[in-house]
């Protein structure tokens, strides 16, 4: 189990690092856009992301 968690964490770091490496200016623009949103919209985006990810995991497994 710990091995799978470590692998998942490492993959998350790789995926999270792709955007800053490939398109740093676009990332800055995106962060400025997110900063201008109110907390409820940011939470809604986070919730949607978690639900999509959890659903994808259920479908895959």
Image (spheres, rainbow, N blue to C red):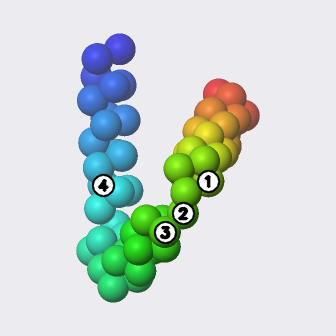
- First along the sequence among labels 3 and 1: 3
Q: Is residue 49 above or below residue 8?
A: below
Give the labeled residue for mark 4: 14
Q: Position of residue 26 (x, y in %)?
A: 40, 82
**In the structure shown, which secondary structural element does the residue marked by tag 1 occupy?**
helix
Q: Residue at x 37, y 56 (%)?
A: 15
The quadrant the C terminus occupies is: top right
Q: How far is mark 4 from mark 3, CA to CA? A: 27 Å
Where on the picture, by quarter, is residue 19?
A: bottom left
Q: Quadrant of residue 2?
A: top left
**Is residue 16 at all visible to an observer of this figure?**
yes
Distance, label 2 to label 3, CA atoms, is 4 Å
37 or 14, nearer to the observer: 37
Q: Which numbered disc flags the more N-terminal residue, 4 or 3?
A: 4
In the image, residue 24 above or below residue 16: below
Whether tag 2 and tag 3 are in contact, CB under 8 A, the answer is: yes
Q: Earlier in the sequence, mark 4 or mark 2?
A: 4
Q: Are marks 4 and 2 in contact (CB under 8 Å)?
A: no
| Residue located beneath label 1 in the image | 41
**How would you rate the neighbour count of disc 4 (Cα within 10 Å): few for under 14, some for 14-19, many for 20 or more?**
few
Marks 2 and 1 sit apart, C-alpha to C-alpha, by 6 Å
User: Rounded to the nearest whole Å, what is the CA distance between mark 4 and mark 2?
Assistant: 27 Å
CB contact under 8 Å: marks 2 and 1 = yes
Q: Nearer the viewer, mark 4 or mark 3?
A: 3
Q: Which residue is mark 3?
A: 36
Residue 50: image location, x then y, percent: 59, 39
Q: Which residue is mark 2?
A: 37
| Element on which disc 3 rests | helix
Crowdedness of circle 2 by 10 Å Cα count: few (<14), some, many (20+)?
A: few
Q: Residue furthest top?
A: 1
> Helix or strand or loop: what does disc 4 sit on?
helix
Disc nearest the viewer among 4 and 2: 2
């Amino acid at each position: 189990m710990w091995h799978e968690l470590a692998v998942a964490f490492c993959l998350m770091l790789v995926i999270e690092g792709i955007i800053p490496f490939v398109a740093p200016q676009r990332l800055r623009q995106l962060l400025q856009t997110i900063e201008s949103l109110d907390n409820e919209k940011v939470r809604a985006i986070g919730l949607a992301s978690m639900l999509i990810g959890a659903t994808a995991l259920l479908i895959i497994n």
